Amino acid sequence: MADYTKPLPVIEKWNAPYWQAAKRHEFVAQQCRACGYVHLPPGPACTNCLSADQDWIRLSGKGTIYSFGVYHQLWHPGFKEEIPYNVALIELAEGPQIISQVVGCKNEALFCGAPVEVTFEAVTSEVTLPKFRLREKSS
């Protein structure tokens, strides 16, 4: 792995299982034991009822592009070689939404409602990021 110059997540006690799963190429979210709400990003409490009693569940990794933008201006020096790059809001099959990047295609191929699936990029020895790629509707 080359030196990674983009922002990295802060791994804390309450989100460590998420990052450990990503390192194993497993996509997970928290599910509240009190109300059943499934949410991302992980947090110390349910974003629906504020209960701290949560489980980790495995997600299918499938979803659709809810919204996206293509950045043509450099906002962080780590992205210099990728201009223009996309940032997408992905609505997962299980309900939660996640902000990520769609990789492996030209930005012109993106559209709202496009089916996507998770893929993983190991960016450091400790951090593997979930990203998404376009998929066929039937898969």
Image: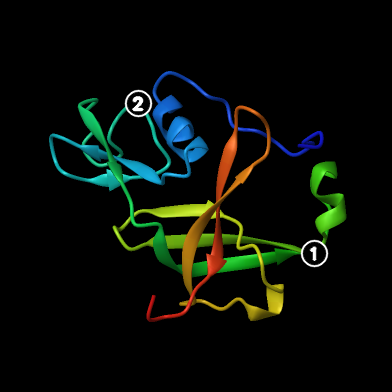
Badge 1: how crowded within 10 Å, few (<14), some, or many (20+)?
some
Residue 110, quarter of the rendered image: bottom right
Left or right of residue 36: residue 27: right
Residue appearing at x 81%, y 57% in the figure: 82
Residue 37, quarter of the rendered image: top left
Gap between marks 1 and 2 measured at Cα:
35 Å
Query: For the C terminus, which image quadrant?
Result: bottom left
Residue appearing at x 36%, y 43% in the figure: 28
Residue appearing at x 48%, y 68% in the figure: 116
Q: Mark 2 highlights which residue?
A: 44
- Residue 39 position in % (x across, y down): 33, 45
Q: Secondary structure at mark 2?
A: loop
Q: Mark 1 highlights which residue?
A: 84
* Amino acid on which disc 2 is placed: Pro
Badge 2: how crowded within 10 Å, few (<14), some, or many (20+)?
some
Q: How many marks?
A: 2
Q: How is the image coloured?
A: rainbow
- Residue 121 position in % (x across, y down): 62, 47
